[in-house]
Amino acid sequence: MTQEHPSKLSFSIEESVWLNKGQEVEEILGMSLEPEIVIEEKDLHVYIKGGLRLVGEYRPTGSAEVVDVDSESLEAQLSFRSAGDVTISDDGTGEIKHFFPIDVTIPISRIQNLDDVYVQVESFDYDLPERSCIQLTADISISGMTTQQETVEKRVEQEIEKEAAKVEEPKFGAIPTAFSFEAKKRPEVGDMTPPSPGRYPSRPFPFTPVSEESAEPVEEKTPAIGASPSTRYTRQEQEVANLSSNEPRQELETNETSNIEEVEEVEAAVAAVAVPTERVELVAEEVEEVEEETVEEVEEVEEVEEIAPAQAETKINLAPLKEMAEALVKAERPDTVDDEKEQVAPPREENALYLTSMLSKGEEKFSKWKMCIIQENESLDTIADRYDISTSQLVRMNRLQGEQIEEGQILYIPVSVES
Amino acid sequence: MNQARTPYDSILFYYDLYPQSIEDYGKIKKVTTSRGVFALKETTIGAHQADEFIHALRKLTKLGFKQAVPILPTKFGEYTLSTGTHTYYLMPWMEAIEYSARDSQEQKLASQLGTIHRLTVKTQPFLKENIDESYHQLLRRWEMRRLTLNRFADESERKTYMSPFELTFLTHAYMLDQMAEAAKNHLEKWYEICLEKEKYRTVLCHGRINRSHAFFNSDNEPLLLNFERACIDTPSRDIASFCRYSFRHAYWVEEEVLKWFMNYERHLPLLEEEKHLICAYLNFPEPIAFAVDAYVASKGNMREFEHVQRLEKRLTSMRRVQRLTQKLIIVSDHQQQEQQ
Amino acid sequence: MELLDWLKENYQWQSVKFVNEALIETEQGRKRLRYWSDKALLDWHIEWRDRCSVTPYMLADRMIRNKDQEASISWKGGWLTVHDEVDQSAVVSQSETEIGKMIGAMVHYGVQSAVDVDSVPQKEPMYSELYSHVPFLRDSHRQFIAPLLMESEKRMKKAIALKASFKNETLPLLDPITTPKQAKKVYQVLIWFGTRQPPERGYYSLRMFLSEWLEKYGRESLEILLAGMYEDDRVTREQAILLCAECLHPYELDSLVMMLERNPRDTEIEEELQKITKEWERSKVLVQVISASIDKKKKVLTQ
């Protein structure tokens, strides 16, 4: 991996998507993560807006497991499709849709050429720890910034390699079907013939490319995104971005005034990231409905951002959460420029699980979360004070072993919502 | 295949009988086949009762009783066939032969009844609850009947213009009530003696023995049939039923009836309480109650005249029964004394 | 003693002639002989035949009794039974209700009977073996089979879920009668020709029977037959659901599995796929009709 790239902001998404009862995953058929980004320049800042769209297709274990023999209509429950009728589109395949909004503001001074700014999904993987949970990990980078800092790359590289390694021990093993068998046999996914034509009509195959990617430079001089290694993800060029720029996001500007101490990042680099979460919708057929809900969610997100004053000039809005839950990830940036490497470490897995499981139970009235990256000399007490929360609560929420926290560690801070 | 003959063709298939003709004699169908002539009985008893009846008949056969018309098994070994509504069984066809013996048919039947009862008599272990239950059940039933009769009498009396039926009934109401009272007394006696002896006897009752349920062969000996109502019960019931059906054939002649009892008791001497029970059964004016019920319930079906006629016939019978039973009990008492 | 004499003596026929080695002609009609070497199996077959009938309109091919009212006679170390024989396969389509009742009686008896006779183990669909074949199939075949496999998994899951709902319900022990051809009519009597096979626990063969019935006589006729089966409530709702679960089992692909074992030509596969399409469709209708009949049954009960 090259170190000569001027600057790159990398962050990881690790997210657990919990599925409703009766919609458990039998087998993941395919999954893709596609950036849908608009980059625009305004008032000395570059706004990178939009998000990452996760689209997955899975075969649900389905309602089959919950046949209700006392129901009034067995006929409806037991019917199945005719031989000719079973096709990919209507065979009960579940669709997972999840939008991770991204909202990054970068001072224009950090950008040499707007055309060089790309958002890339550097690696993407998922795991199925259990049938009702899909765990996603992805490394996202925003490139095209100037920086003195170089270690970032290394880190990213490492992570990518890690991901690649993970992928190489085939996940398919756990999902024994003919199709996965197929997939293993043909790693040249990009142009692979789908195992059963019509089955993955135009969907990229998510798995294998990771290794490809790690073999190639993460960023290329060619500005065209399409040419970049991660071809499999549909690159959203500006035109596409314009479409999504309709979404109202003005209030983000308020964030510009925000001003924070944390995250040793290249001045101008990423900082406060207010990340609204989308609801992850399991779409079987009614895709339209889902889209509506998505819009709703986005609106809520906006509120969140108002509530949480972001002070950094540059922000990344990263949203890892799941249905029902919204997370407010706030990586705040110190105004004092600190030329150190970015430290947006991926949250621990348990955290993701914990958050979602807790939220889904509705135990507490938190529906939004901030993510705080621990700085040098910070203690649990100082964090607790700042967010007006007890240390014990922090320990509990983050499942900490004790009160010791380390620099770079990420803590989730619940934001209670009056509702 | 003639549709009208179903279900008989289907039934007869079970016997491998392929009829040339089926003649309808009511409940009996005369079936002529290349293998002989048969009588197919069609009854409304249920499958369970059919089983019991076959069981009773087979038990009798096993005990050496040969005076029953045989029931032929199907080719699969069953003796009856029960559909949802009917039960069928097959017998060889028998033509009635003219009866030519000196002794009456009833005397011979009484003898057979005695034989059956002797073969199957059992002294039941005394269970007071059983006795109590039978006693009270019968008593209650009779009391209800008596009440109904009395009410009918009361209602009739209040009318300015009584119908001929009502008038006839009223004329005999007192006698009927007396008979009901006598029946009750006999029943009480039976109950008392049973309690005292702490035992009672049961036999296999034919249920409806009378001359129409028997064929007399060339030796003038009866072959019994229609065991459909066979059950285990007190011999008194079978005898009372026999008497009630047969008295008229004896023209109410006391000597004839006494002969029946003698013939019967040659096989199975009756106990005192059993005679009381016979008297109880016979004295209770149940036939009158049925006649009144029929009159009240279905005036339209039968003309008043017919109702009256039937009532008068039954009243005459009851009067004669009253007379006969009085003698019967005296005789039996006498016998008892002799035995003692 | 000669067999014919032995039969004459036992069944008290005047004349007996062989038609072929298993058929005899007597003055009481044509009879079929069956030889049994397993007494327990014979007893089971006597018992269910005796117990299941729709008197007088339908009965099994019961064992005709000998002069001593025995259902079988011993012969050469085994046993012989004598049955009625009917030559012509009659039109049974008018007798749905009786046949349904007959099946009902068999199910009822099969659930209750506690006999120690060896039964055929329950069959399981083989479709999952196809997974290993799929990669080697032509695209068009794969396209056809892959979704069917998915749907098969779904059907199987539903079937399992149904069965799981009635874990404590006993499946009936049934004579594996698989085709409506086994019902014949003579003298207004339908005779249900049983087999000599070991009985089967469950509804595998009955499903085949019903499926063939559906193909031959159509949906409406099958509905009448099912209604007959439910009459008298001898077939409980639970049993009906278990029957339905059996019909959900995706056996349609089994024949393909077996075919692929021996490297068939593409045209053969294509023919097979067409056959599967038909069978699959029939199973679909079968499940529909049965589940609808169960729904109807429930409605009647809850009224």
Image (cartoon, grey):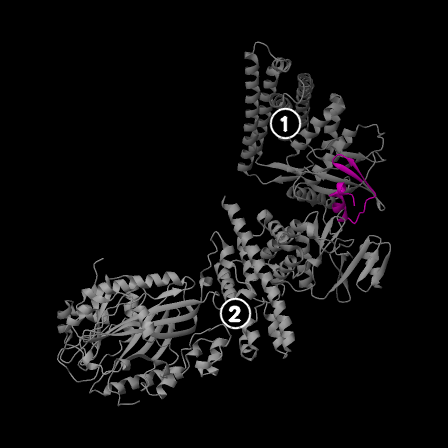
Q: Name the residue nearer the viewer: C23 or A299.
A: A299
Q: Quadrant of the C terminus of chain A?
A: bottom left
Left or right: where does residue C6 sit relative to residue B197?
Answer: right
Q: Quadrant of the N terminus of chain A?
A: bottom left
Reply above or below: B265 against A346.
above
Instruction: Using residue C213 as the reference point, say whether residue A201 is left or right of it.
Output: left
User: Label 2 lies in what chain?
Assistant: C
Residue annotated with mark 1 = B281
**Relative to residue C168, is residue A126 drawn left or right?**
left
| Residue C97: percent from left, percent from top | 65, 49
Chain letter, disc 1 residue: B
Locate residue B135: give its quadrant: top right
Distance of label 1 from label 2 (alpha carbons): 81 Å
Q: Secondary structure at mark 2?
A: helix
Reply above or below: C64 against A400: above
- Between A262 and C195, the residue placed more toward the observer is A262
Report the span colored magenta: B1-30
Residue C32 image point, x, y percent: 78, 59
Q: Is residue C43 visible?
A: yes
Which residue is labeled 2 in the image? Answer: C147
Answer left or right for C273 relative to C238.
Answer: right
Classify residue C218 by image quadrant.
Answer: bottom right
Residue type highlighted by circle 1: Tyr
In this rendering, does residue A414 appear at all?
A: no
Residue A414 within the segment the image draws in magenta: no
> Which residue is more in the foreground, A112 or C3?
A112
Question: Which label belongs to residue C165?
Answer: none
